[in-house]
Image (tube, helix red, strand yellow):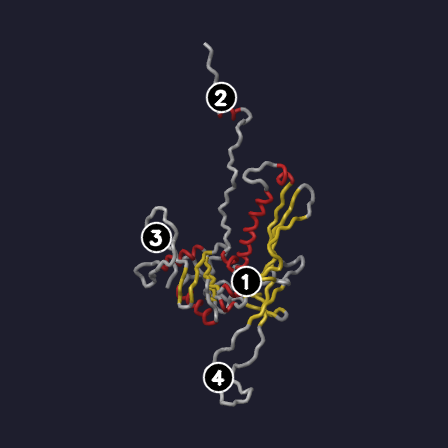
Amino acid sequence: MVAANALYNATALRATGNNIKEDVEQVITMISPEETPILSELGKGKAKADLHDWLYDRLAPAVNNNAHYDGDDFGTNVAGDTTTAASRLGNYCQISKKQIFLSGRVMNGLDLHGRKAEMARQIAKKAPELKRDMEMSITANQVAVPEVVATTIARSAGMPVWIATNDDFGAGGASGSLATVGDRSVPTGARTDGTNRALSEATLLGVIQNAWIEGGMIDRIYVRPEIKARISAYMFQGGTAAARIATPTQDYGPNPDRGVTVVGSVDVWKSDFGVHLITPCRQQRVDDVFCLDTRRWKVAYLRKYRVEKIAKIGDSERRHLIVDWVLVSKDEAASAMVTDINDVAMTN
């Protein structure tokens, strides 16, 4: 009796030389967040020098004794009515870049999974990385630093150093400071971190009120996601003095199950001093709550975003994505900041 042939199956195909092609989906999945809510909201401008300057001015304080005789001679004045020059501020431009270095085989030879061209994929990936780096610099406690060739890299001062008029910090903390550089003031003194504490409504409302008194209109509050959740939880507490009654003013989108939509997020806070959109930002520190009049901030570009091809040397291709930028604080007194915050429950 002749024995039947052995079954020729997938196991047999793999046993000698692995004859089965790999099964790899031709899509590369990446969930890394690309949003830059602060950078995206700020205005844009043009810088023409590595030390970028701008001017600001203030109205004289209001007085209650501005009264004169009929026919008074010109020059009869009241206290405080003087002509003053605008003040000059400055910040240094910062060069930020991402580099790509690919071999000749990767560029032109290899058949790669999930993409047709590796250089194009890398450029598409590096672009949001560059913007995230910029946003982290904008929200960092970083002072303005001028470049010293081959010694010191220029840095643009971040928001925590600028905001000083309407800030609130923990015990032992201190505001950032300006110093005179030539004929302008530049933020060269870093903020001193204090003892962390819980965020309170009274503190947050207090700095917003102070900014309003100065002339600011806070339209954005930026916090880390952890603190955003704490604010929402606080506003939705039931049966306490802190409880809020929220009236939805917009459609929350279609509910596929046709059930009841439970709202557990506070995105807009209407205080006595305006309407403030509360936005989570992944790039900023947990410690900081930025209350911004976004009209008074912008990013000026000495060189806008660009992809540059580097001269070819050997069997490789090189590119870099580069941007030359500076943070402009038109008048920091229009904004506010609460710092030294813990990721704990918000209080009254």
Q: Is residue 125 above or below residue 86?
A: above
Determine the secondary structure under disc 1: strand
Amino acid bearing label 4: Asn
Mark closest to the chain's N terminus, 4 or 1: 4
Query: What label sits on residue 262 in the rendered view?
Result: 3
- Residue sitting at x 52%, y 38%: 26
Task: Tell me the quadrant of the picture where the N terminus can be found.
Answer: top left
Q: In the depicted view, which residue is nearer to us: 25 or 140?
A: 25
- Residue sitting at x 49%, y 87%: 68
Question: x, y (%) of residue 170?
Answer: 45, 64
Amino acid bearing label 2: Tyr
Amino acid bearing label 3: Val
Q: In the depicted view, which residue is nearer to us: 121 or 180?
A: 121
- For label 2, count other residues whose C-alpha is less than 10 Å away and answer few (under 14), some (14-19) or many (20+): few
- For label 1, count other residues whose C-alpha is less than 10 Å away and answer few (under 14), some (14-19) or many (20+): many
Mark closest to the chain's N terminus, 1 or 3: 3
Distance between the alpha carbons at the discs numbered 3 and 4: 57 Å
